[in-house]
Image (spheres, rainbow, N blue to C red):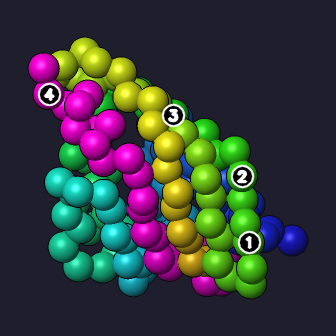
Amino acid sequence: MTTPTDVVLALYARLTAGDARGALALMTDDIEWIPMMDYTVDGRGPQKVLEGMLIPAMTEWETFTLTPSEFVAEGHKVVSIGRFRSPHRTTGKSADVNYAHVWEVRDGKISKFRQYIDTAAIEAVRHN
């Protein structure tokens, strides 16, 4: 049986591999995606996530890793705590920052995502 944590782990693996289509397949048709600053997912659904988050993030950052180190799960909700690492395409500086992600999983797919990340550290990497 696939647990909500298994679904989240599968999404991290697909994103780290650069497999946007595979990541989108793990989302419900009405997913709500609440990202960090400067990315706007206008509306619901995998296509909105692709346009507002995945394409801009993959354009801005080189190959990145999302490395969860801790999970807290209760029912259909999963909180993952970990690190985001990636060089920035424009500045060449490398990000290595903490994050907390809150996921909701429904029927084996992700239905909601909220991101918390060290935005000051991200901004420092974005600018020369």
Instruction: Report the side of 99 relative to 37 (left or right).
Output: right
The stretch of residues the image draws in magenta is 106-128
Discs 1, 4 touching: Cβ within 8 Å? no
Name the front one of labels 2 and 3. Answer: 2
Q: Amino acid at mark 2?
A: Glu
Instruction: Report the side of 71 relative to 118 (left or right).
Output: right
Q: SS of the residue at dot 3?
A: strand
- Give the vertical position of 105 relative to 96 (above or below): below
Q: Amino acid at mark 3?
A: Thr
Instruction: Report the side of 30 relative to 75 (left or right).
Output: left
Q: SS of the residue at dot 1?
A: strand
Q: SS of the residue at dot 2?
A: strand
| Image-quadrant location for residue 13 | top right
> Residue at label 2?
70
Quick check: can you spot residue 14?
no
Identified at 30% across, 47% down, the residue is 119
Identified at 28% across, 43% down, the residue is 120
Question: Between disc 2 and disc 3, whose residue precedes?
Answer: 3
The label shown at residue 127 is: 4
The Cα atoms of the two marked residues, 3 and 1, are separated by: 22 Å
> Residue 54 appears at what percent x and percent y?
32, 50
| Image-quadrant location for residue 74 | bottom right
> Residue 35 appears at what percent x and percent y?
33, 62
> Residue 30 appears at what percent x and percent y?
39, 83
> Residue 31 appears at what percent x and percent y?
41, 78
The Cα atoms of the two marked residues, 2 and 3, are separated by: 15 Å
> Residue at label 1?
73
The label shown at residue 65 is: 3
